[in-house]
Image (spheres, rainbow, N blue to C red):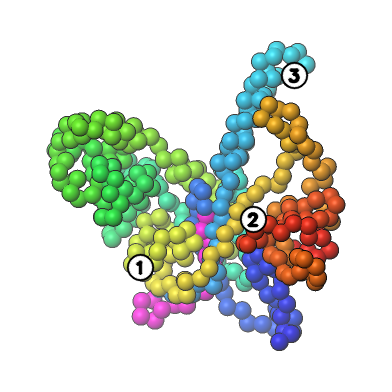
Amino acid sequence: RGRARVHRLMPFAIRLTDRRLVQSALQPLRLKLDPGSKETGVAIVREATSEAAGEPDAFVLSLAEIIHRGRQISEALTSRRSMRRARRGRKTRYRAARFNNRRKPTGWLAPSLRHRVDTTAAWVRRFIKLAPITALSMELVRFDMQAMENPEISGVEYQQGTLQGYEVKEYLLAKFGRSCSYCDATDRPLEAEHIVAKANGGSDRVSNLTLACRPCNQKKGKLALEAFLRRDPARAKHILARAKAPLRDAAAVNATRLALLDALRSFRLSVETGSGGQTKYNRRRLEMPKSHALDAACVGNVHAVSDWQRPVLRIKCAGRGSYQRTRLTAHGFPRGYLMRDKRAFGFQTGDMVKAVVPSGKKAGTHVGRVAIRATGSFNIQTAAGVVQGISYKHCRV
C-alpha cells in the first residue's frame, strides 16, 4: 500500500513511487495492431518463447479498439465542397482562382485516410509512454488486390502452404456480409462460388466470385446465373452489380498500410509484419472469437495466446470541435450561440472525468463524458444516464 499512484484513468495505468526506472528490470512488451477502415485493434502482449514449438507465446496484458471517424471527415469535406461550388457559381470577381494550388506532395493521402494513420500512430506513441514496449507488430496486407486477381503472382509467401486461399475468402466474407448470396443463409459453412462456372469459361478473378452455401453451390453447378435465378431476377441483378463493385473498406486499408508502416518505423523499434490470412489462420487454430482486438493479438508468428479474456477499451475519435459559433434551424437561421472558447476551467466537452460530489442531492462519484458550460456547471454522461449541474470544482480528468 502506498507504493503506487494512478497515473492515467483512460487507459488505466499506475506508476510506482518507491522505485526509479534505472533500478528496475522490465519485461519487454510488444504492441500489435490490426488496422481496419472503421476500427483498428490494439493488443499489448508479453512474449515468452515456447520450448516445444520454438515460437513465441503471447500473454495478453491489454486490449483496445480505436473507432475511426473517416466517414464523418469524408462527409464534412463533401459538404464543404458543395458550399464552395455554390460560391464559385456566383461569378464574383473578388474570389481568387483555385487552379494554381492543385499539386499534391509526394505521399499525400486524403484527409479521411490520413486521419487513420495519424490517429493510430498517436495512440502507439501514448502506449509507448505508459508501458515498456520494445517491439511492434502490424497486419500489413489485409486485402491484396493484385494477388487476388492473379493467384500465380510470385514473391508472395502467403499464397503457398496452409494459408493458401485465406486472403480471397476473407475478402468475399467481408464483401458479401458473411451470408449465402442465393439463400441468405448464415448458419452454415460458406464456399467461394464462381458466378460464371469454370466449365463455361469462367475465371478465378475476384469479380467472378461470390459466397454460397454447399447446397446452393451444388444446385447451381454450371448453370448460368440468370438461369439458376430465373424466378428471382432481382437477386441475380444485385449479385452481378455487387460482384463488380470495389470494396471501399479494403481500398482504404490498402491505401494507408504503407503509410502506417512508415509511421511505426519512425519510433525506432523492431517492426514485425504479417498478412491477414496468417492472422485468421492463427485465430482459428487457437479457437478465439472474431474481434479487432483479438485479431491484433494473433498478428504475426504466434504459437499460443493466453489471458485474452479481458475487457476491451473502446477509443472513439471525436475530432477537435467546430469553428461554427451558432446552432442552426432546419431553415438555416441561428437558434443559439456557442461559447467563444472550447475550454472552460481546464475542461472541454468530450473529456472523460471523475466527479466526487461530497454532499447534496447529487452526492457520490460520477464517471463519464463531460459537457461543459461557461458558468462552470457541467453535465456528465454516465453509464446510468446524464447527471446535470456538477460544479467544475468536483471534476478531474
Is 338 displayed left or right of 79 in the figure?
right
The foreground one among 32 and 174 is: 174
Q: Give the residue drawn at x 36%, y 69%.
A: 286
Tell me residue 23's x, y (percent): 70, 83
Return the disc, 3 or 2, that comes first in the chain's sequence.
3
Amino acid type at circle 1 is Glu
Q: Which residue is mark 3?
A: 95
Element class at badge 3: loop
Amino acid type at circle 3 is Arg
Q: Quadrant of residue 102?
A: top right
Q: Which residue is mark 1?
A: 287
Tell me residue 234's x, y (percent): 29, 31
Q: Residues within 10 Å of mark 1 (few under 14, many from 20)?
A: few
The foreground one among 215 and 153 is: 215
Q: Give the residue drawn at x 58%, y 46%.
A: 69
Residue 122, numbered label? 2
Amino acid type at circle 2 is Ala
Q: Give the residue drawn at x 61%, y 79%.
A: 26
Numbered-mark total: 3
Q: Quadrant of the C terminus?
A: bottom right
Camera-nearest label, 1 or 3? 1
CB atoms at circles 3 and 2 under 8 Å apart?
no
The foreground one among 183 and 161 is: 183
Tell me residue 259's x, y (percent): 55, 48
